[in-house]
Amino acid sequence: MSANGRAYEESHPWITFNFETRSLGEVVWAHLGESYSKCQHLIGAPLQPRVAWDLARVYMRRGALASAAIEGNTLSEDEVNDILDNKRRLPESQQYLEQEVLNVLNALRSVRQEVWESDGAFRLSPDWILGKHSELMEALDVAEHVNPGAYRDVAIVVGNYRGAPAADVPYLMEELCRWVNAILDDAASKRDRTPDQAFFLVFFAATLAHLYLAWIHPFGDGNGRTARLIECAILAHCGLVPWVSTNLLSDYYNRTRSRYYERLDAASRSGDVAGFVGYSALGLRDQLREQIRAVQDHQRRVAWINYVHERFQSEPSTDTARRRRAVVLAMPDGEPLSRKQIRYLTPTIAEMYDGASERLFRRDMSKLVELQLVEEVSSGKYESCIWRMDAFTPRPELGVFAPVLEQLPPEPAP
């Protein structure tokens, strides 16, 4: 035991409540810079309310399931959706799996509500952490040494890792909150910090809180879920990360579970805290890239629908025009289709062409080609021209950013 009476200083010398950002390489800073930029793009992205709600629901459920899955939960995303959307009930022997995921979801919802009601300032406190642990362990059949919403009072070993001495846990949790709050205060200092610098500090606070709680292991069970929830809450409260992105890291940790455990182990075994922070920074960047693509796909589709309707403004409002418009809007992106495939794209289109001659179908396709909404890529094979919405996509074959407008047909007459 050390001179000041804290056993953890000898048993867990890596718990120092100190992190030197100078230990991060240039690549990590690049990942963080890109992540900040992508968060701002998402914050400013226009989306239809229903689509935004659907995306938020998908990512919150996925993150909740991921956090539970890391701890051994075996439910699939489809099963969770079936439980939540269709009120499916699992067999009694599997209901604890459902409860684990529901608890994470409910804890995330409570964080979201706190963000909505917040004045912008978030203070991590032992009481807040204890409350969230209680939510995460609600209605679960736990071992005798596990007390939901209370620190453990026994030694604990998980795999090859031994948690900090139980007698030191309350002190360590107070110190963790003090340290994290100091980083958040630094991030909130508008006089000294630009928004991107504030984002970096908030990210450090979130990932370090996650790492240190895993090191301290203050609870008999549920430490990982609590650590990942804290990480999400810190990101959610900062005002620099959209809610839909705050839980992305849980999904990343689950996808790369073996690497996640390796980084946690290396951080304590060899003091490679920068390795864990860098691993998390890479994951956030990659997950944000996926989110940006999902948002862009929707925006691209909306732009295409609007453009198709615009091209048909000069056409008579007839059943023929409606049929042609339905065909082009039903065609998938980047997939050449035969005449037969197009005629049966949807039940509605199949009904429109029921009994129609091949000549009528060819006239329809010729008109869509004339409007440059469809192109014939080979004999009898057609493809949607939705690529015209990619206004600034580089064209490698030309060696330039090809102006799409040069390839468009004349605008319809007013």
Image (spheres, grey):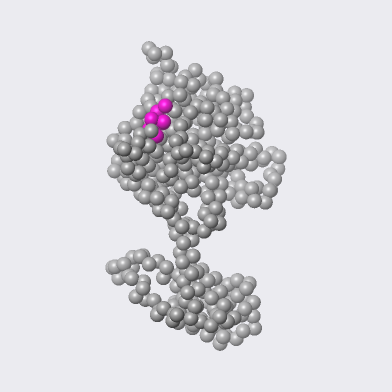
Observer-nearest of 108 and 312: 312
Q: Quadrant of residue 50?
A: bottom right
Q: Is residue 23 left or right of residue 86?
A: left
Observer-nearest of 135 and 43: 43
Q: Residue at x 41, y 31 (%)?
A: 181
> Where is residue 254 shown, x and y percent of the image?
50, 43
Most frequent secondary structure within the magenta stretch: helix
Screen quadrant of the N terminus: top left
> Where is residue 339 shown, x and y percent of the image?
54, 79
Q: Which residues are magenta?
A: 178-184
Q: Is residue 144 left or right of residue 282?
A: right
- Residue 181 in magenta stretch: yes
| Residue 194 to residue 48: above or below | above
Q: Is residue 83 left or right of residue 222?
A: right
Residue 414 seen in render: yes
> Where is residue 44 shown, x and y percent of the image?
42, 54
> Where is residue 96 shown, x and y percent of the image?
65, 38
Q: Residue at x 63, y 72 (%)?
A: 347
Q: Residue at x 35, y 36 (%)?
A: 189
Observer-nearest of 342 and 203: 203
